[in-house]
Image (cartoon, rainbow, N blue to C red):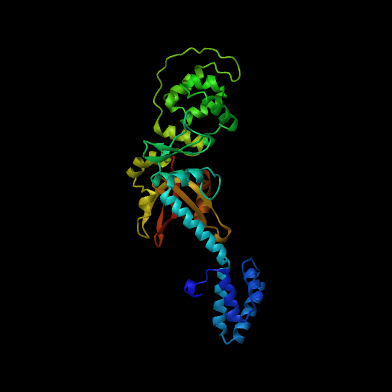
Amino acid sequence: MAETLGVLLFQEQAIRGAVAAAGFTPGEADLLRRALSRARSQEAMEGLRARFVRGAEERGIAPATAAAIFTQLAGFAGYGFCKSHAASFALIAYQTLWLKRYHAPAFYCALLNQQPMGFYPAEVILGDARRHGVETLPPDINHSDWRYTLVRVDNRHWALRTGFQTIADCGEHAWARLAAAREAGSFADLEDLCRRTRLPRDTVTSLIRAGACDGFGARRELLWRLGELDFRPDELEIPPAAIPVALPVLPALEQTLWEYELMGLSPAQQLMKHYRAGLRARGVRSNGEIKQLEAGKRVRGAGFVVVRQRPATARGILFMSLEDESGLLDVVVKPEVYQELRTLIRGHVLLLVEGIVQRNGRAASLLLHRAEALEK
């Protein structure tokens, strides 16, 4: 095991260890590896241990040392890969990191177009793209495609344009109508869009609220104008009567919430950015700041819950990932805390949390003590 400095990393090494230490044939050692990689009863495990220790003793290894070797093999079996599998994963990881470093816009565009997949929702991927310098553009009725696309900005850099597939109530049938109508030229205004596409009113409403029609005017005014249109899909056009009205400006937070409602994300900014000034006034740190603190520091944070998981092997511990505009923060919730806060944690996506910073090298997490709904 010189290539891994004596540390068991590959399944082949477990086989060689059983052969060298306990006199197993390669076939017997592979059967041992398979047995250890599955859930076994305590009785079965003791039988395997006895067989291994007996073979090791015959080769002059002390029983205590043999038992320690078997414990290492048993612990390794739960996570080890064969060498070829590990190498292929390493190659994919290297290629992925290279693409992310040198071709970030194309990398994120391709990744978003393969959703749903993997561990994180599209909202997290888009936020990570922004934090790595990729400009993200909203859907646009005259420029977006069905999927995410790359567009050249000022002939200098590539930006990521959100596609219609992200918008609720805009399915492939609606996209087909849009694309067909757009072949005759760009849409001049809302009336032109409705007249040429004859899309259902609910679909046009979603397009407006998601920001795809921002080129035609403010969203509230467009919704009012849509209500004025005697717009009946697939029927004769009736000229509308315009009624002037002064509408209040749409608050920035409400606009972002509309986008999250319809697309599950906001191409412009992460939701938590709207809360930052108020949170700072209450002494609440950003995720980026928390991850720079020393271990043992008690701190308050807040974020949008993007991941909740309770692995069967974690003995009742819940792991959460909170996202804000600065990145992700891992939060560890012990069983007794989870039981106390279960309804809150499962029922809210915006949380204000308090806990102790934990560190493992450069990685940081928060051990949760208290939490409340951010809406409060």
Number of numbered labels in the structure image: 0
Query: Quick check: 327 above or below 256?
Result: below
Where is residue 333? Give x, y as percent.
49, 55
- Residue drawn where x is 38% and y is 54% of the image: 291
Where is residue 257? Give x, y as percent.
46, 35
Instruction: State the residue lying farthest toward the left.
Output: 281
Within the image, what quadrant is residue 244 found in?
top left
- Residue drawn where x is 49% and y is 39% of the image: 148
- Residue drawn where x is 54% and y is 73% of the image: 72
Query: Quick check: 226 above or below 95?
Result: above
Where is residue 206? Give x, y as percent.
52, 29
Question: Which image quadrant: the C terminus?
Answer: top left
Q: Is residue 57 visible?
A: yes
Within the image, what quadrant is residue 46 found in?
bottom right
Q: Can residue 80 be seen in this view?
A: no
- Viewer-side residue, 282 vs 187: 187
Where is residue 309? Give x, y as percent.
54, 53
* In this rendering, position of residue 369 left or right of residue 51: left
Query: Quick check: 39 above or below 154?
Result: below
- Viewer-side residue, 199 vs 299: 199
